Amino acid sequence: MKKKTSADAAPEAVTAVTPEKPAKEKKPRTKRILTLERKHTLEVIIFLAPWIIGTAAFFLNPIISSMRLSFSEITQLKGFKMGWVGLKNFEYILAYDINFMPIFVTVVKDTLINTPLTLVFSLIIALLINKPFVGRGFFRTCFFIPVLLGSGYVMQQLLQIDAMGTVGVGIVLPPMLKGLLGNTISVVVQSFLDRITLILWHSGVQIILFLAGLQSINGTLYEAAKVDGATQWEMFWKITLPMISPIILLNFVYTMVMYFTSSDNELVAYIIDEVFVSQQFGQGAAMGWVYFLFVFALCGLVFGIIKLNSREKKGVTANGKRR
Amino acid sequence: MRSVILDTLTGKRVPRRVDFAHILLVLCMLALVCFTALPMLAMVCRAFMPLDELYVYPPRIIVRRPTFSNFSDLLNSLNASEVPFTRYIFNSLLTTGATVFLTIFVSCAGAYGLAKFKPRGSKTIFAVITSALMFSSYVTQIPNYLIVTELGLVNSYWALILPKIAVAYNFFLVKQFADQLPDSILEAARIDGAGELKVFWTVAMPMLKPAWSTLAVFSFVSNWNDYFSALVYINKDAMKTLPLALQTLAGGAGVVARSGSVGAATLLTTVPTIVIFCILRGRVMQTMTYSGIKS
């Protein structure tokens, strides 16, 4: 077995070593470095090429043409000929389209409410599942299964069961309790329950990511803290939370993007409708771009805030709190 | 009491016997599970509901008089079509399998190359990918369609495979893991005389296993469930994928008369993902939780 691997590696080893070996004495030193460098870039290209080609063909190219589309109008559907119209599409969707802005605002509001809630819930669940207890595997599977079903058509089916636009299959308040609580309160409670159902259905991946983070925390940290007399409460805030902060950031962005781009998002549905049903390609593309730029700016903001925050914290620890 | 709950919350205390806090914890979990389990239960029940029960107000979750008529309706409409049912399954399996395989390979190679060689402009590439994450793929659907048409791939398997290989999310996931590969091990392999491709294939890939097995499941699930791109790129019956075929045969979401069949179709669509998950469950859960992100 070992012989085979060494034989396998031999030709490659030779090529790897040749630049070092003064094979041709006349070659100047700089040339040799260049060839090594060139070999290196070649390897990098081999690794990256499939990816870059794929991205260029099926991501960058469509994005550029959708950008062009957002400034144009389809003059001829056959052959897809475009005519430049400047900012007309944007003007239309921002000033004249009576549906776009309200849906946009609702979607943003919903996402901003749902994202922190999702994070909190998934962190709590991850903390609970992280400790050994009877039936842990069962619970873990239960929370993960929505991830399997939750994308695409099945999710839409589940969410559309009630014509009211809410989750019709979640926990419904029994009529008796409804009567007891009165109309306004029961509506609030019901929408709260619906929201939690929605959130838990979306938090499978986040739970797993948090679990991964929790498992990777070094146990000795907790022991040391315990020896120093820290309470569990302090340990959570001073050890667990800071240790998983990169995952919190990752999860935050992931969750936000997930809510913004999922197909059960109203605005995405509206854009699809605009493009595929009304065939207003230019306006659809413009909507997509307005939306994307907003999401992009929001994520940038989150990154910025967290980076600033961590820098401040680092500053504090460097100023002598530690040791 | 507070500290006991917190102990259990932070997971640092293992109750050796079943005590109050333990029971409380399990009850808590059960309550939370209800939220995720009820819709699933409803989905299963809807597949067996007779039509009159589907439209009862208030909506029912548990089926009272289970019936197989939904499935037989679905089978009848399947038999009425010219394409055999197995063809759809084959289509779905082929395109999904190929996509998963290729995306794993391409993402791992790319992410490894970017993370470990750090070529010039790697920061720009990564920035592009990160921002690509935020772009809803539905927005670029039309230009994508144009490209696929130009390449002459409409109504072929490639139309369902090629656009979904270089997915930003997959790359991002693997890159996060690849960043943490210790350079010393790769270096050791190189000193032992392994070429770059060999280092990648025999050293990096096994170490990236948690990343790509996770990726395999996610990619399978999302590609299997995705009926939208099939809807856009495929208009020949024989090339349709299973979810699309089931949805069209069941009459779509809006048709009242067939909403029973829609329920049955929905349930049938979920079966493969559940099976895949059951096969890979142990591995995925473990790799994701235990060897996930370690520095």
Image (spheres, coloured by chain):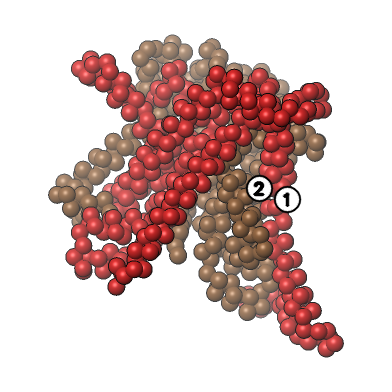
Instruction: Determine whether, in the image, residue B58 is placed left or right of residue B221.
Output: left
Are the residues at dot 2 and dot 1 in contact (C-beta closer than 8 Å)? yes
Instruction: Determine whether, in the image, residue B47 is placed left or right of residue A286.
Output: left
The amino acid beneath tag 2 is Ala
**Residue at (54%, 37%) from the top-left corner?**
A294
Residue in front for this viewpoint, B53 or B165: B165
Which element type, helix, strand or loop, lies under badge 1? helix
Which shade of the palette goes to chain A?
Answer: red
For disc 2, the marked residue is B166
The amino acid beneath tag 1 is Ile
Badge 1, how many Cα within 10 Å: few under 14, some, many 20+? few
Residue A75 showing in the rendered view: yes
Real-space Cα separation, disc 2 to disc 1, in angstroms:
8 Å
Residue A129, how many percent across, how many down? Answer: 33, 49
Which element type, helix, strand or loop, lies under badge 2? loop
* Residue occupying the far bottom of the picture: A25
Q: What is the quadrant of the C terminus of chain B in the image?
A: bottom left
For disc 1, the marked residue is A53
Compared with B162, A16 (above or below) is below
Instruction: Name the image quarter holding residue B135.
Output: top right
Residue in front for this viewpoint, B39 or B237: B39
**Residue at (53%, 39%) from the top-left corner?**
A295
Task: Give me the chain that's brown.
Answer: B
Residue A247, how many percent across, how many down? Answer: 43, 53
Instruction: Determine whether, in the image, residue A166 is placed left or right of residue B100.
Output: left
Instruction: Name the image quarter holding residue A81.
Output: top right
Instruction: Determine whether, in the image, residue B55 is placed left or right of residue A92.
Output: left
